[in-house]
Amino acid sequence: MKGGYGLGKPILAWKTKMKITNDLNLKRQASELGVSIWQTPSFLFIVMGVINIIAMTTTFIIARNYDDPRILVLSECIVTGVIFFFGGMIVNGVEQIARLNRAKSEFIAIASHQLRTPLAAINWEIEILKSKFKKGLTKRQLQGIENIEISTKHMARLVGDLLDVAKIDQKRLNLKKEKIDLVQIIDETKSNLRASLKNNGIVLKLNVSGRKNEAMVLGDLEKIKLAVENLVSNSIKYSRKYGKIEILLKKNNGFWVFSIKDNGIGIPNSQHKQVFSKFFRSYNVSRYQAEGTGLGLYIVKNIIKESGGKVWFKSKEGIGSIFYFSLPVA
Amino acid sequence: MKKYKILIVEDEASLQESLREFLSMENFETVSALNGDDGIALVEKEKPDLILLDIILPKKNGFEVLEEIKKNKKTEKIPVILLTNLESAEDVNRAFDLGVTTYLIKSSYTLEDIVKKIKENLGIG
C-alpha cells in the first residue's frame, strides 16, 4: 500500500471478526474471538459437569457392587484425573480468550489512533479553505467542502467511539473530576444537533427542577458532553418524525439526575438486559433504518459509572424510552 | 509589530504544510523540521519563540527532543506545545514533567484553537 498507513488488512480482518450482531450465541462468540467452541469456558464447564456426574455415579455403583477397595481407589483416581484434565483445559481456554480480548483492544486502540492523523489533515485543510479562501470559491465548491466536513466529522466520531471502547476495555478511561454544568452541556448539545432536530421536525425541551439555570456536577467535561450527546442523538435517531424529546434535570440525594424522554420506537422487553452491551442493536431498529454501531450506550454506561454515577432506563416498544443518569453534585 | 518565529517539528508533510500555511496567514514566521534531529538543530540555529512538537517522530522522538531542549541553557526557556494524537495519561504526565506548557490532541483542535494556544503561550493573546 504505497504511501498508506498499512491498515487495510488489519481493519478488514477486524471488521470480519467483529461482525455486529445481536445473536450472540456461544458458537458465534467463540468464532468472533477466533477460538474453537471446544475451548470456551461455558462449554468446558458443561462437559466437565457431565463427566463428573457420570464418573461419580459409576464410582457409587462400583462401590456398592464390589467389595474390593482397590477398585474404589482406582475409580476415584480416574475421576480426579478427569477433573484435572478438564480443569486445565478450562484455564487454558479462559487464558486464550483473555489474551485475544487484550490483543483485540490493543489493535482497536492502535488503528483508531492511526486514523486520527489523516483525519486531522483533512480537517485542517477544510478549515484553511473555509477560513482563508472562501471568497475564491464557487457556491458548488463550498457545498462540496461542507459535505466533506460533515462526513469527516462523522468518521471522527466513529474513530473516537472505537478509541473510547478500547480505553474502557483496557480500563484506561482516566476521567478528570472537574466542576461542570449540565445545563450548559445540554445547551451546547442542542445547538450541535440542531440540524438533525430540524430535519426530523423534532422539538427538544429542557426543564430544570426548581427553575435553576445551572446544574453543577463533578465529571470530565469532554466525556460527559459525549455521554449527553450520545443520549440525545439516540433519542433523535429513534424518534418518529415530528416527535417530542424532553430532558429533565432533578436534584436528588446529592446527585443531579438527568432524564431524557422520547416517544420513539422504544426497545422490546426481551432486549432490555442487553441495552448497555457492546454492539447492541435492537431488533426493531432495522425497520427504521437508523445508522449506528451499537457502541453509544456502552460508552455512556462506562463514562457515567467511572464518574461515580449510575445509568438506567425504562422503555416500551412502540411507546418510547426514558434514559436516566446521575452524577454527584459539585 | 514583532513577527514571532514558530518552529514546527512534524513528520506528516500534509499536517506540517497546513500548520505552516495557517500560521503564516496569521502573521507568524515559521521554520519546520520533519524529524527530531533536524528539530534540535533548528532550535539552536533559529532560536524560535515557540516550538510546536509532535511525539512520534523519526530519528529522535518528541520526548527526546524535549529533553535536549530543556537540558540546554540557551533553549530551556522556549515554550513548547506538544501537538500529538497520543493521549494516554502516561504520555501527558511525562510531557508535563519534562516542562511542556501545553498538550494538544491534533484531531481535537482546529488550527484557530492552536493559534489561540500559541498566542496564550507567547503572552500576546
Image: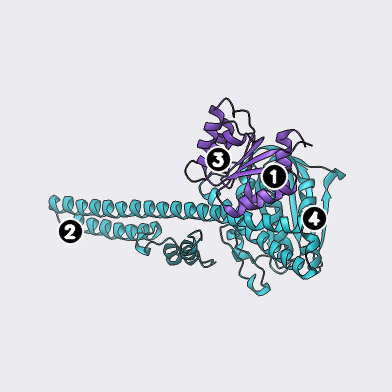
Comparing marks 4 and 1, which lies closer to the viewer?
1
The chain identifier of the residue carrying mark 2 reads A
What is the CA distance from the residue labelled 4 to the residue labelled 3?
A: 42 Å
Helix, strand or loop under label 1:
helix
Three-letter code, disc 2: Asn
Residue at point 42% right, 65% down? A31
Q: In which image quadrant can residue A267 be found? A: bottom right
Numbered disc 4: secondary structure: helix
**Would you say B70 lies left or right of A62 here?**
right
Mark-to-mark CA distance, 2 and 4: 81 Å
Q: Which mark is residue A191?
A: 4
Q: Which residue is mark 3?
A: B39
- The residues tagged by marks 2 and 1 sit, at their Cα atoms, a distance apart of 86 Å
The tint chain B carries is: purple
Q: Is residue A71 above or below residue A283?
A: above
Q: Chain of mark 1?
A: B
Of residues B115 and A26, which is closer to you in this image?
B115
Residue A94 horizontal/vertical position (percent): 38, 53
Q: Residue at x 40, y 62 (%)?
A: A34
Do discs 4 and 3 share a chain?
no
Q: Residue at x 76, y 67 (%)?
A: A143
Among the two numbered marks 1 and 3 on one chain, the one whose residue lies closer to the N terminus: 3
Res. B114 mark: 1
Of the residues tagged 1 and 3, which is closer to the observer? 3
